[in-house]
Amino acid sequence: MYTTGFLFNGGCGDMRGFANAGFDPRFGANHDAASVATARLNWPNIYVREAAIQTIDMRTLPYADVLGGSPICWESAPAGGNSQVRVQVELSADSTDNDESACWEQTRITAWEPVRYTEVHKPLVYAGENVPRFATGNRPLFNAWLHVWDALGYYPEFTSVNSAHITVETPDGVLGPLPQYRDRLVWVMVRKDIGKVPDLRPRPQSICRECGPVKGVQFWPGHTSGRGRRIGSYLHRMARSGTSRAKTSYYYVCPTERCHQRVEPVTRGIGSVINKSVRGHRFGDGRQDRNEAYGKATRARVAAGIATYSGQPFIVTLRNHCTASSLDDPIGTITAQGGAHHYFVRPTESLLVDDCEYRSLTVEENASAQGFPERHRFAGKPSEIKSQVGNAVPVTVATWAALETMKIMPP
C-alpha cells in the first residue's frame, strides 16, 4: 500500500480523501495542537508532529510515497482582491465567528515547505490545492515555483475544479457533488521517472437540453487558441461573458459531436445537509453574541428571502453582492471562519422579518458540506473545529485527485 504524509493536516480533508482512495496515512504535521489531535483521533497509529512547519527539519519526518500539503497564497502578498498585505500570524482560538482579523491566521504552510521535504525524501508525488489566485495573483513567483519543481525532477499537472461538480466512486460507495461552490486549483507533481501523469480533467455529470445526461467538458472562452495555462474559476450563467472574469474562467459544454452547447453540471443543494431539528433564535431579538440588532443589509437579505421563497426556509449569505438563496442550491465557499457567513432562515406564518427563526450553520452541517463523513471526528474547542472545517480540502475533491493519482503509481 502506498503511504501518504501531510505537512498541514488541519481537519484532515486531504488525508481523508487519500485514505478513501486506498492510500495509507503515515504522518501529519501542524502547528495547531487541535489539528494534530484530530489526526490522532481518526488514525491512532499515525506519526504526528506538533510544530510550525517552517521550523521542522525535514530529515526528521518519515518518508511517504505521496506528500500532501496545501500552502497559503504566498507568505506576503495581497489576496482576494484586497490591497492589504497579509502575513501569517499565530492561530487564535479566542477569535469570534465574525472576527474579520481571523481570516488570515497561520493555517497554511508556505509554498516552499513541500520543496524542502522533497529535497530530502524525493516522494513519488506531491499533491496540493489552493484558490486559483495562488497561480494568477502572483504569476512571476508562481512560475519560479514551478521552475524549482522542474529542477527537482517533477512534472506538474494542474486542474481548475469546483467542489459542487465532482462525483467519485469509491469502494465504500459514491461520493456525490458537495453542496458548496468552492473553486479550487488542484495540482499533482509527479516524479519524472514515473513516466506518466494523472488525468485531472473534470467531467461532471451534466444535463444537455438536446442530448440529456452527459459528462461535461471544460471550455475556456478566453483560451480559444488552446494555448496557455488554464487556471481560473467556474463561470456561472449569471456572469456576463464579456467581463474580464470570463477570460480567466470556464464552463462546461456537451461532449456530443455537433452539439457542444453549454451544459450545467448537476449540483446538490445545501438543504441536503441542513438539520431541521436544530432551532435558531428570533431574528428580532438581535445578535446573540453581541446583544445588538442586526444591520440593515442583513435585514434586507432576510426580507428578500421571504419574498422570493414564499415563506419557505432559505439561506442568507453575509458577503458583498450576496443575498438569499434556495436550499436547493449549493452555498458559497465555507471560509476559514468556519462558515460564519451562511445563515439558515425559517420564516413563520406571519412572514414578518422579526419573527423569522435565524441561526448560523452548525459545525456538523459545514463539515458535511465539506464532504466529511459522520465517522470523521474533530478535536478541540468549537472555534478550533470551525477553523479546521473551513480550512479543509474538500474531501470529495481530494478523493477524486487521489483516485486519479493512484492510477499512475508504479507497481
Image (tube, helix red, strand yellow):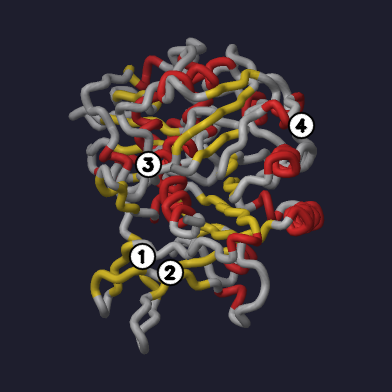
Q: Front-most of 387 and 100? A: 387
Mark 3 and mark 1: Cα distance apart in space: 27 Å
Question: What x and y, as percent, mark residue 189?
Answer: 62, 54
Q: Front-most of 50 and 327? A: 50
Mark 3 and mark 4: Cα distance apart in space: 34 Å
Query: Of marks 4 and 1, which one's residue comes earlier in the chain?
Result: 4
Q: Amino acid at mark 4?
A: Val
User: Helix or strand or loop: what does disc 3 sit on?
Assistant: helix
* Left or right side of 352 for 32: right
- The reply to whether discs 4 and 1 touch (Cβ–Cβ < 8 Å) is no
Say the numbered circle drawn on residue 87. 4
> Which residue lies under the disc numbered 3?
20
Q: Quadrant of residue 193?
A: bottom right
Question: What x and y, as percent, mark residue 61?
Answer: 65, 29
Q: Residue furthest front?
A: 411
Q: Amino acid at mark 2?
A: Tyr
User: Helix or strand or loop: what does disc 1 sit on?
Assistant: strand
* Left or right side of 67 for 410: left
Say the numbered circle drawn on residue 264. 1
Which residue is found at the position 64% from the left and 65% from the top? Answer: 244
Q: Amino acid at mark 3?
A: Asn
Q: Is residue 246 above or below residue 18?
A: below
Which residue is found at the position 67% from the left and 30% from the top? Answer: 104
Crowd tier of the residue under label 4, counting other residues whose Cα lies within 10 Å: few below 14, some 14–19, many 20 or above = some
- The reply to whether discs 1 and 2 touch (Cβ–Cβ < 8 Å) is yes
Q: Quadrant of the N terminus?
A: top left
Mark 3 and mark 2: Cα distance apart in space: 27 Å
Q: Nearer the viewer, mark 4 or mark 1?
A: 4
Q: Nearer the viewer, mark 3 or mark 1?
A: 3
